Image (spheres, rainbow, N blue to C red):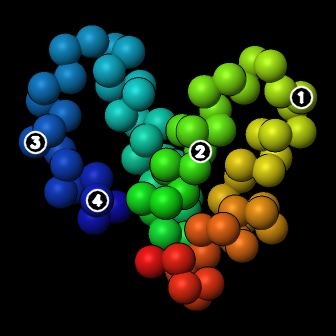
Amino acid sequence: MKSYVMGRKNFLFHDTVKGAKASAVVYTLAETAKANGLNIRLYLETVMTKMLDYKNKPDSILEELMPWSEAMQKSCGLNNGTI
């Protein structure tokens, strides 16, 4: 909730519904990553990189990209020395 409150003035600059939805998606990803003990920057970078061509991948990649997945815990976990 704190990150939402901190960014509320930025929300005034959402010119479109698509921009507001995109912001909501990023905030949701960041908060879910934080709740699962991941390095947020590294997690978002990993997800954005792997999702570039997700249409060419099987649906199983979506499960691998979830912040609670074993793959994300190993590569982006805070206690794995990835900071």
- Asked whether residue 48 is in view, the answer is yes
CA neighbours of label 1 inside 10 A, class few (<14), some (14 to 19), many (20+)? few
Q: Position of residue 8 (x, y in %)?
A: 17, 45
* Residue 69 x, y percent position in the rendering: 78, 62
Q: What is the secondary structure assignment of the residue under circle 4?
A: helix
Q: Earlier in the sequence, mark 1 or mark 2?
A: 2
Q: Nearer the viewer, mark 1 or mark 3?
A: 1
Residue type at tag 3: Lys
* Dot 4 crowding, Cα within 10 Å, few <14, some 14–19, many 20+: few
Residue at 57% from the left image edge and 39% from the top image edge = 49
Q: Quadrant of the C terminus?
A: bottom left
Q: Which residue is mark 1?
A: 58
The answer to whether any part of residue 31 appears in the image is no
Which residue is label 4 attached to?
Answer: 3
Return the residue nearer the eye: 38 or 23.
38
Amino acid of disc 2: Val
Name which residue type carries label 4: Ser
Q: Which residue is mark 3?
A: 9
Q: Is residue 69 above or below residue 58?
A: below
The numbered mark, 2 or 4, whose residue comes first in the sequence reads 4
